[in-house]
Image (cartoon, grey):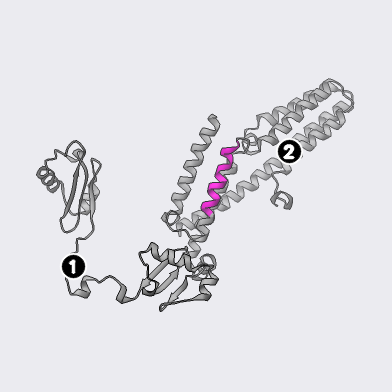
Amino acid sequence: MKRELAAAAALVLVCCAAAWHTLFVIRTADELCGMVAEAERAYSDGDADGAAERLHEALELWLDDGYLAAALRHSELDSVTQGFFDQLELIAEHSPSCHVGFERLKELISGAAKSELPSPGSIF
Amino acid sequence: MTIILIRTVIVFFSITIALRLMGKRQLGELELSELVVAILISDLAANPLQDIGIPLLNGLLPIVVLLCCELLISGFIVKSATFRSLVCGRPSILVENGQISESEMRRNRFTLDELAEELRGQGITDIGKVKYAVLETDGTLSAILYPSAQPVTPAQLGIAADDPGYTVMIINDGRLLEKNLAIAGRDAVWLKAELERRGAAGPEEVYLMSVNSAGDVYYQAMEGKR
């Protein structure tokens, strides 16, 4: 009976860990998207340097997160990281497609988070 | 390459620990749920070994979940006969009183060739000698012969059979197993006398030594010491 109780407790623990993981990923993605949105506003106001600085902060937050580096698929990690660098390049070049780039980066970040969320689409 | 090496070691020990926790049944004849778990574990665990882009957690977490599910299911199987029959099914009597049940054979998709093959594996070539043949839930076939076809026992001949008792290994590849020596009801004095009688200076010169309750000793010295 002890073994079965331990198994049930372990399953509950795993479920709680999975729930925490989902919340953490969503919270981090929201924070990063918020920082990208701030960078976008700064760029729209003509402050390209401020936008790049804000984006750098978001990139550092993304790269320094050891848990996400271990928990997410490397393809997702690489896509978002590449998205950050591509957007920094667009800002530096004052490219006309900069605003689209901001949207794309936010979509990449939220897409990486959505792939961790349980939904009929992701399960089936 | 180093990553794959480290992951392989982690996954190997994780699976070993998981199967060890599941118990001896997992290694022997498998019930349905146990077979499912065994297949899944080996397949899931291999994914992060083949692609280092997949987080190692994606291989280890399923092992933990499957282990917990299997422990819970096996626990319920022990507690509930209904649950057991639901998960494992019921044994099927393929041969009853010497008659092969065609309906049971069809239901289990068991052919006569397979029945003959399983019986041959148990040393039975004449199906006429089989009184009962039961297809167990783990897929093995148990055959019970007619009494006239069964090997005769000492009791039937009125012979008092010697009971050698349980044989215990005392020395294993040069190592003295003191716990087993105590289980066999022997002590170091007895061991020393036995070794001296056989010309051995100590347990390190013995490859295998065992003794049963009747005092019969099996002794084999190490190569080079014989």
Describe residue B96's horizontal placement relative to residue A54 as left or right: left
- The residue tagged 1 is B161
Looking at the image, which is closer to me, B105 or B156? Answer: B105
Q: Is residue B35 left or right of residue B169?
A: right
Judging from the image, what secondary structure is the residue with disc 2 in? helix
Query: Which chain hosts label 2?
Result: A
- Total number of numbered labels? 2
- Using the rendered view, name the quadrant where residue A68 is placed: top right
Question: In the image, residue B63 lies at what x, y percent?
Answer: 54, 48
Main SS, magenta region, reads helix
Q: Is disc 1 surrounded by few (<14), some (14 to 19) or many (20+) residues within 10 Å?
A: few
The secondary element bearing badge 1 is classed as: loop
Q: Is residue B50 magenta?
A: yes
First to last magenta residue range? B37-51
Return the residue at label 2.
A29
Q: Percent x, y for residue B54?
A: 62, 38
Q: Residue at x 56, y 38 (%)?
A: B49
Q: Nearer the viewer, residue A49 or B193?
A: B193
- Residue type for callout 2: Ala
Q: Looking at this view, is B120 or A55 the one in front?
A: B120
Is A120 situated above or below B53? Answer: below
Chain ID at mark 1: B
Image mark for residue A18: none
- The reply to whether residue A8 is visible in this rendering is no
Image location of residue B193, percent across then percent down: 10, 46
Q: Are marks 1 and 2 on the same chain?
A: no
Which quadrant: the N terminus of chain A?
bottom left
